[in-house]
Amino acid sequence: MDTIAVSLPSPLQLSIDLTDEQFWQLCQRNRDYRFERNAQGDLIVMSPTGSDTGRRNIKITTQLEIWNQQTKLGVAFDSSTGFKLPNGAERSPDASWVKKEQWESLTLEEKERFAPICPDFVVELRSKTDALKPLQEKMQEYVDNGTKLGWLIDRQNQQVEVYRVEQEVEIIKSPQTLSGENILPGFVLDLAEIL
């Protein structure tokens, strides 16, 4: 059988009925793509990020992991990590963090798959090709499912949207740093090479 290349818009959202196991297998067999599912079960297919976005994203995850290693308060994750949120959506934030107690409450099997928890902290880094509204909706979904602090870093508008539980979204124009507040005590993200 010949292989053909098909050009599809990214992200692509498909209404397809997959069990959790089928979704897991799809992700494992297609590691060059990023897959998510929304709460309705629609499959969202995203291409890998561009090099510049990846370069900026690693600066976020590196700073988060260094802080986490020093404090030992939880577990930090990169953009390849999937979580099954309480509403049924399966999401992969660009960077995330889970409190130690929450992580340790999971079984080994739950940790090896898409952990059935919502991270306490999430970051989404908007790339040049990302539409803003879907990212804002995704950030609100995180908060609605248990995230206590979230940052949407919007390079195009040179701003950060800060999401907190039961609060209006705060927009900070051209910040130099961001504070982890009481969720990540002592964590300060240097945005010099990110924003």
Image (cartoon, rainbow, N blue to C red):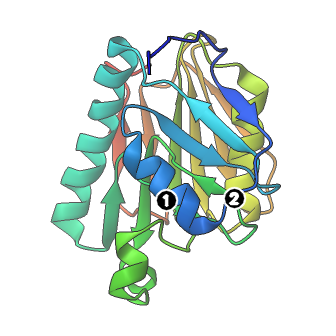
Residue at the location (81% across, 47% down)?
168
Residue at the location (35% across, 55% down)?
77
Name the spot of residue 21 as percent of width and height, x first: 54, 67
Name the spot of residue 57 as percent of width and height, x first: 36, 30
Residue at the location (48% across, 71% down)?
115
Task: Decide: few, some or many residues near mark 1? Use Cα within 10 Å; few <14, some 14-19, many ≥20.
Answer: some
Image side of residue 132 versus residue 2, left or right: right
* Whether residue 47 is situated above or below residue 113 in the rendered picture: above
Residue 43 position by quadrant: top right
> Callout 1, which amino acid?
Trp
| Residue tagged 1 | 24
Q: Which mark is residue 128?
A: none
| Residue tagged 2 | 89
Residue at the location (29% across, 21% down)?
55
* Whether residue 66 is situated above or below residue 127 in the rendered picture: below
Of 158 and 55, nearer the camera is 55
SS assignment at label 1: helix
Of 59 and 18, nearer the camera is 18
Image side of residue 76 versus residue 168, left or right: left
Query: Dividing the image into 4 quarters, which one contains the C terminus?
Result: top left
Name the spot of residue 101 as percent of width and height, x first: 40, 86
SS assignment at label 2: loop
Image side of residue 82 versus residue 58, left or right: right
* Whether residue 32 is situated above or below residue 163 in the rendered picture: above
Query: Dividing the image into 4 quarters, which one contains the N terminus?
Result: top left
Q: Nearer the viewer, mark 1 or mark 2?
A: 1
Residue 87 position by quadrant: bottom right
First-in-chain label (1 vs 2): 1
> Callout 2, which amino acid?
Ala
Residue 9 position by quadrant: top right
Name the spot of residue 92 as percent of width and height, x first: 51, 48
Of 79 and 18, nearer the camera is 18
